[in-house]
Amino acid sequence: MMSADDGQEAAHVEQLLAAARSTALAARHCWIATVGEDGAPHARVVSQIPGVPGEDAWTVWFLTSKASRKAAEIRRDARVTVGYQHDPDSAYAAFGGRAVLLDDPSELASRWNPAWNAVFPAGADDPDAVFVKIEVERIELWNLAFKVTPAPFGKRAAVLRRTGSGPWAREP
């Protein structure tokens, strides 16, 4: 049986997840930070691809070149952070997790958007095209519209963590 405190905590976690989702959906582009060969973070803008129905809502997808620096860095160290910013809500969300590169032809074909042919002329059959799939394990967020940062309000970001596809929990 769930206690009142457990119910309040679950409701708060859902509020944090809603704020993170809102921030990510409101952002036109996101940033991905990878770990460079020298151990330093390297960040660049990418356009995320919406997931498909039935897929974990906390999986981030985007398309890149197999020959890109980001792909090489992901092959070397899968730890990444994807950042979103939405100025009207004074909001940001940072999603951390492990990235994998997927070049399976059936995966490429099932998710392919013809607009990407401008970058990958052979479409889903382009040998340089690869999806990056990030399974989010940690969310850090700040959102004034949702007022979700821990007390005292405004001193630090709210943080959620999960293991695998398990439930989310707040970090103290």
Image (cartoon, rainbow, N blue to C red):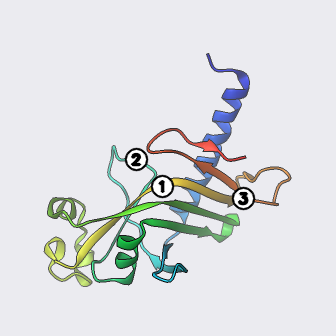
Split into 4 quadrants, where in the image is the N terminus? Answer: top right
- Residue at the spot 56% in from the left edge and 42% down from the top edge: 168
Q: Secondary structure at mark 3?
A: loop
Spatial CA distance of label 1 from label 2 is 10 Å
The residue that label 1 is drawn on is: 136
Q: CA distance from mark 2 to mark 3?
A: 24 Å
Residue type, numbered disc 2: Asp
Amino acid type for the residue under numbered disc 1: Val
CB atoms of marks 2 and 3 within 8 Å: no
Label 3 amino acid? Ala
Q: Residue at x 68, y 28 (%)?
A: 6
Q: Which residue is mark 2?
A: 56
Q: Residue at x 33, y 83 (%)?
A: 68
Q: Which comes sooner in the sequence, label 1 or label 2?
A: 2
User: From the viewer's perspective, is residue 86 above or below residue 166?
Assistant: below
Nearest the camera: 100 or 22? 100
* Residue 73: image location, x then y, percent: 40, 76
Residue at image mark 3 = 157
Where on the picture, by quarter, is residue 98?
bottom left
Q: Is residue 156 left or right of residue 26?
A: right
How far across and down, in percent of the image, does residue 24 sit? 53, 61
Among the two numbered marks 1 and 3 on one chain, the one whose residue lies closer to the N terminus:
1
Give x and y (percent) for residue 52: 32, 52
Q: Residues within 10 Å of mark 3 (few under 14, many from 20)?
A: some
Distance between mark 1 and mark 3 Cα atoms:
17 Å
> Dot 1: what SS?
strand
Pinpoint residue 67: horizontal percent, then vertical percent. 28, 83
View extreme (top): residue: 1
Q: What residue is at 67 percent from the left and 47 percent from the top?
A: 171
